[in-house]
């Protein structure tokens, strides 16, 4: 007679599953039906940031420590003396930020101007700028040119 205490499935109707990934208790010993594929055999998906054992990116990047003034650094457009000589050949003897922009000598108007020596100047010029090197100042003043330093705060 069939009662609740003697219920069982018919013979052959249920099959035990293979106990994969259980090492020596799996009936298949250590190969786990995936043979010896190492890391590939154990994970079906990799994380997007997984780097296969090399030092990960977040550990290669240095930590941000301390304070740095690089955000407050003042940048300058560089103007050489040969640029002034080029403008003097066009009969432009008074030079400022707008004139340099119109003649495509500088590209960024919002940056300051800095004059550097890279040529012997042959004409008298008047220039407005933010900074000047000592040799360039000497070369301009040698020809009785004028340098007006703009104080931008």
Image (cartoon, rainbow, N blue to C red):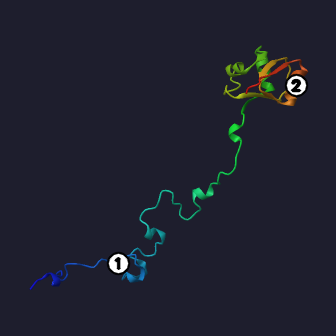
The residue wearing badge 1 is 19
Q: Point out which mark residue 108 bears.
A: none
Task: Pick out the residue farthest to the left.
Answer: 1
Residue closer to the observer: 138 or 6: 6
Task: Pick out the residue farthest to the top.
Answer: 91
Asked if residue 61 lies left or right of residue 52, the reply is right
- Residue 91's place in the image compared with 100, above or below, is above
For disc 2, the neighbor class at 10 Å (few under 14, some 14 to 19, many from 20) is: some
- Residue 67's place in the image compared with 22, above or below, is above
Q: Secondary structure at mark 2?
A: helix
Residue 129 placement (x, y as % from top left): 77, 24
Asked if residue 56 lies left or right of residue 134, the reply is left
For disc 1, the neighbor class at 10 Å (few under 14, some 14 to 19, many from 20) is: some
Residue closer to the observer: 86 or 72: 72
Asked if residue 151 lies left or right of residue 122, the reply is left
Viewport quadrant of the N terminus: bottom left
Look at 44% across and 70% down and name the residue there. Answer: 42
Look at 70% across and 46% down and name the residue there. Answer: 67
> Between marks 1 and 2, how big is the CA–CA gap?
88 Å
The residue wearing badge 2 is 139
Look at 68% across and 51% down and name the residue there. Answer: 65
Q: Earlier in the sequence, mark 1 or mark 2?
A: 1
Look at 40% across and 78% down and name the residue there. Answer: 22
Residue 137 placement (x, y as % from top left): 86, 26
**Picture mark count:** 2
Asked if residue 64 lies left or right of residue 13, the reply is right
Proximity of marks 1 and 2: CB atoms separated by less than 8 Å: no
Residue 54 placement (x, y as % from top left): 58, 63
Residue closer to the observer: 35 or 132: 132
Mark 1 or mark 2: which is in front? 1
Residue 138 placement (x, y as % from top left): 89, 26
């Amino acid at each position: 007679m069939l009662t609740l205490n003697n219920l069982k499935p018919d013979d052959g109707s249920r099959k035990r599953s293979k106990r994969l990934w259980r090492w020596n208790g799996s009936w298949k010993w250590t190969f786990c039906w995936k043979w010896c594929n190492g890391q590939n055999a154990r994970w079906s998906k990799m994380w997007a940031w997984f780097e296969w054992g090399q030092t990960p990116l977040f550990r290669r990047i240095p930590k941000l420590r301390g304070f740095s003034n690089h955000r407050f650094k003042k940048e300058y457009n560089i103007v050489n003396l040969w640029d002034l000589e080029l403008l003097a050949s066009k009969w432009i003897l008074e030079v400022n930020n707008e004139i340099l922009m119109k003649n495509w000598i500088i590209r960024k108007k919002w940056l300051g101007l800095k004059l550097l020596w890279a040529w012997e100047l042959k004409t008298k010029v008047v220039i407005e700028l933010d900074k000047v090197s000592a040799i360039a100042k000497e070369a301009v003043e040698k020809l009785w040119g004028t340098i007006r330093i703009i104080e931008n705060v």
